[in-house]
Image (cartoon, rainbow, N blue to C red):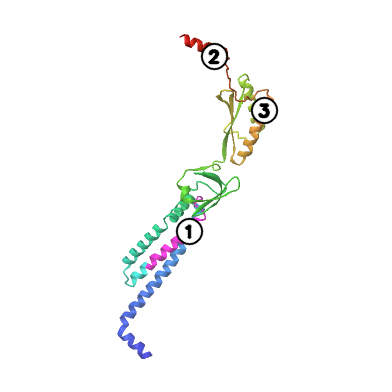
């Protein structure tokens, strides 16, 4: 055994030394890569503290992706150390990545859209949003889909790609919303009395915001009524409760002021038979 090892050393000493040297370099590259991966992951994990809009869901994704990227670079360096033609391997990996990308085009598109939504944050969990034909409260925001719950309790799972390609209307983001309540009074009623009735509604509702200030105005001179408009602002959380209460209180206040809320009216003029016959004879005489 010893003689065999001695003979192997004597005939291949240079090759053994070269392989040992390359093996040590490969181990050093792996250790350096592992150390670099740890530094990169720690740096990425600290990002949410500096950038509040970067969601915590993205942190492990970016950390894992960066770790794989570092290990791939280390593998290419090790192969190059051992004399492997890395150019062909890189080309092969590129072709394989292109094929996978084409096969998973829709899925990768949803992932890319999900990352952009998580970074730009057009909505957060708990916001009521309208995205194209879908509307509801956001309950979950992931890489592939966004989950909504409608007002009547329906579950909606919308692909992020479809949301990213449409305008997003966020009803919660600004924290306040405006509402316009319109009530009609008769043409014989006093507009000033109508304004006073609406102002009493404003004074009795504590959930209305003082800034922007509430407004009352003549919205339209309609066919059967003078339409008065109450324009007020409230917090997004109180919107629907205030909206329902205001309509009730506006009607009661207008009626309490002695004003009339008219129904649509249309005057119809009927001609008697003798009038019709007279017009026909006159037409024939001409």
Q: Secondary structure at mark 2?
A: helix
In the image shown, does 97 or 17 lie closer to the viewer? 97
In the rendered image, which residue does mark 1 sit on? 61
Q: Position of residue 195 (x, y in %)?
A: 62, 24
Residue located farthest toward the right when viewing the structure as drawn: 256
Q: Which residues are magenta?
A: 51-75
Q: Which residue does the image show at 30% across and 85% down from the upper left?
A: 11
Q: Is residue 255 left or right of residue 99?
A: right
In the image shown, does 252 or 198 lie closer to the viewer? 252
Q: Quadrant of residue 217?
A: top right
Q: Which residue does the image show at 33% across and 85% down from the upper left?
A: 9
Q: Position of residue 190 (x, y in %)?
A: 62, 20
In the rendered image, which residue does mark 3 sit on? 253
Distance from the alpha carbon under mark 2 to that under mark 1 = 86 Å
Q: Position of residue 273 (x, y in %)?
A: 57, 14
> Which is nearer the N-term, disc 2 or disc 3?
3
Q: Quadrant of the C terminus?
A: top left
Q: Label 1: few (<14), some or many (≥20) within 10 Å?
A: some
* Residue 276: image tag: 2
């Amino acid at each position: 055994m010893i003689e065999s090892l001695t003979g192997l050393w004597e005939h291949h000493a240079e090759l053994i030394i070269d392989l040992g040297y390359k093996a040590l370099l490969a181990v050093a590259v792996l250790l350096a890569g592992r150390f670099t991966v740890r530094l990169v992951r720690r740096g990425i994990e600290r990002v949410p503290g500096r950038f509040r809009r970067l969601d915590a869901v993205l942190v492990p994704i970016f950390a894992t992706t960066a770790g794989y990227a570092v290990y791939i670079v280390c593998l290419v360096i090790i192969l190059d150390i051992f004399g492997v033609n890395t150019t062909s391997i890189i080309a092969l990996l590129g072709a394989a990545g292109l094929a996978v990308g084409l096969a998973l085009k829709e899925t990768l598109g949803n992932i890319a859209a999900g990352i952009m939504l998580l970074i730009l944050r057009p909505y957060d969990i708990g916001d009521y949003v309208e995205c194209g034909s879908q509307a509801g409260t956001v309950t979950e925001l992931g890489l592939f889909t966004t989950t909504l719950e409608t007002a009547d309790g329906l579950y909606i799972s919308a692909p992020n790609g479809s949301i990213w390609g449409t305008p997003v209307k966020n009803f919660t983001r600004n924290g306040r919303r405006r509402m316009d309540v319109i009530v009609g009074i008769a043409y014989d009623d006093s507009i000033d009395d109508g304004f006073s009735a609406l102002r009493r509604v404003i004074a009795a509702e504590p959930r209305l915001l003082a800034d922007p200030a509430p407004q009352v105005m003549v919205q339209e001179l309609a066919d059967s009524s003078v339409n008065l408009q109450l324009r007020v602002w409230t917090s997004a959380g109180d919107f629907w409760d205030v909206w329902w209460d205001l309509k009730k209180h506006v009607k009661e206040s207008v009626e309490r002021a002695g004003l009339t809320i008219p129904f649509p009216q249309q005057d119809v003029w009927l001609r008697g038979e003798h009038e019709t016959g007279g017009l026909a004879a006159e037409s024939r005489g001409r």
